[in-house]
């Protein structure tokens, strides 16, 4: 097989100059996370890279067609369509397209003061299953947001905007279920089912047993599952939803605080005010007066 550095039909790539990297490093926003190289190689037959000293940046490769492989720490891993991997900066590595079915890849190099926050997904292959909510096109649009803005030049505004897009782009891989939430079917998700039940019953005084029973779990098991998924207990979450609704009523209705407390199932106005203050850090009377928007 003939290996080559580039020269793939319809390839695109941008490598930022050192002077621009220095601007990125010195900027308060972009220094946290930024792109140094970015590109797209379609049907990249002969694509091959080996770096005995590793790269100064982390390398993200997202395969959308064909196949390839990469090796880190002496371990070779195969890569197929709708799979991605990120090679950690400083690690010797090799990656290449398949000879029989060369990959098409979206790739970028990134670094920054906070790039270590994604370390949990470095150096492994991850698959993105073709579920109805997969949002494959949306992820490519994010990539294009970064590429096309850099292609328009290196103004501070462009650099800062691409940094913010980069956070979202990498997050679409790291937090796959959250990224899909906007298109997700709610059926079968007991957490979503429980939250919807809470939202439909804001005027009620639901207990943990009520909520757990609705999704067919024991209270203790449901409480553990809910806490692990959301970081909150079910009843705390229920109170958050109540207070969120209370804020909307304070903003957009003429209801008095006592009436809002009654409508949302609090024992009395004082109980409501206590829970409201705990969530919002100010009493409802003060919140209602505050200018918003």
Image (cartoon, rainbow, N blue to C red):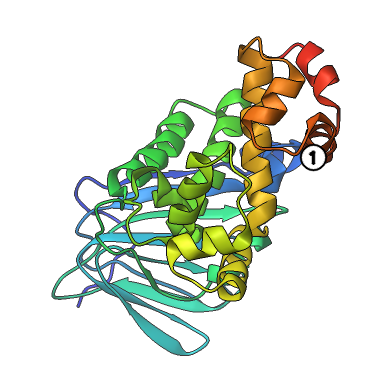
Residue 11's place in the image compared with 288, above or below, is below
* 202, 102: nearer the viewer: 202
| Along the viewing direction, whichever of 246 and 109 lies nearer the viewer | 246
Q: Position of residue 147 (x, y in %)?
A: 42, 38
| Image label count | 1
The quarter of the image holding the N terminus is bottom left
Q: Is residue 243 left or right of residue 5?
A: right
- Residue bearing the label numbered 1: 275
Residue 216 seen in this snapshot: yes
- Asked which quadrant contains residue 219, the reply is bottom right
Q: Secondary structure at mark 1?
A: helix
Instruction: Specify the farthest residue to the bottom.
Output: 74
Q: Which x, y percent locates residue 257?
A: 75, 20
The vertical placement of 195 against 48, above or below, is above
In the rendered view, tell whether residue 61 sits above or below residue 291: below
Q: Residue 12's x, y, as percent?
A: 32, 44
Residue in view at x 51 percent, y 44 percent: 168
Identity of the residue furthest to the left in this view: 100
Mark 1 crowd level (few <14, some 14–19, many ≥20, 10 Å Cα)? some
Q: Nearer the viewer, residue 278 or 266?
A: 266
Image spot of residue 198 (x, y percent): 53, 47
Identify the residue shown where x is 13% and y is 75%: 100
Which quadrant: the C terminus?
top right
Image position of 188 with respect to 180: above or below: below
Residue at image coords 46%, 46%: 196
Residue 108 can be seen in this image: no
Residue drawn 28% across the image and 62% down it: 82
> Residue 58 falls in which quadrant of the image?
bottom right
The residue lying toward the viewer, choosing from 42 and 260, is 260
């Amino acid at each position: 097989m003939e290996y080559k550095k580039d020269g793939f039909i319809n390839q695109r790539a941008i490598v930022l100059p050192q002077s621009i990297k220095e601007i990125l490093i010195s900027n308060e926003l972009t220094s946290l996370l930024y792109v140094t190289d970015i590109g797209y190689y379609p049907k990249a037959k002969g694509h091959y890279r080996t770096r005995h000293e590793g790269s100064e940046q982390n390398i993200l490769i997202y395969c959308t067609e064909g196949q390839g492989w990469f090796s880190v720490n002496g371990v070779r891993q195969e890569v197929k369509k709708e799979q991605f991997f990120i090679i950690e900066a400083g690690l010797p590595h090799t990656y290449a397209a398949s000879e029989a079915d060369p990959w098409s890849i979206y790739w970028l190099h990134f670094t920054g003061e906070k790039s270590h926050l994604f370390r949990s997904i470095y150096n492994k292959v991850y698959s993105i299953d073709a579920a109805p909510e997969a949002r494959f096109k949306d992820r490519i649009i994010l990539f294009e947001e970064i590429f096309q803005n850099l292609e328009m030049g290196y103004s501070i505004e462009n650099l800062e905007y691409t940094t913010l897009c980069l956070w979202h782009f990498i997050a679409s891989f790291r937090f796959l279920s959250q990224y899909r939430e906007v298109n997700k079917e709610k059926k079968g998700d007991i957490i979503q089912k429980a939250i919807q039940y809470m939202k439909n019953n804001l005027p009620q005084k639901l207990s943990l047993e009520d909520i757990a029973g609705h999704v067919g779990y024991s209270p203790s098991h449901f409480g553990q599952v809910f806490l692990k998924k959301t970081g909150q207990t079910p009843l705390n979450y229920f109170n958050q939803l109540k207070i969120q609704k209370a804020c909307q009523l304070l903003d957009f209705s003429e209801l008095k605080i006592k009436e809002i407390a009654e409508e949302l199932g609090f024992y009395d106005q004082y109980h409501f005010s206590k829970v409201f203050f705990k969530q919002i850090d100010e009493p409802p009377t003060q919140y209602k007066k505050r200018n918003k928007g």
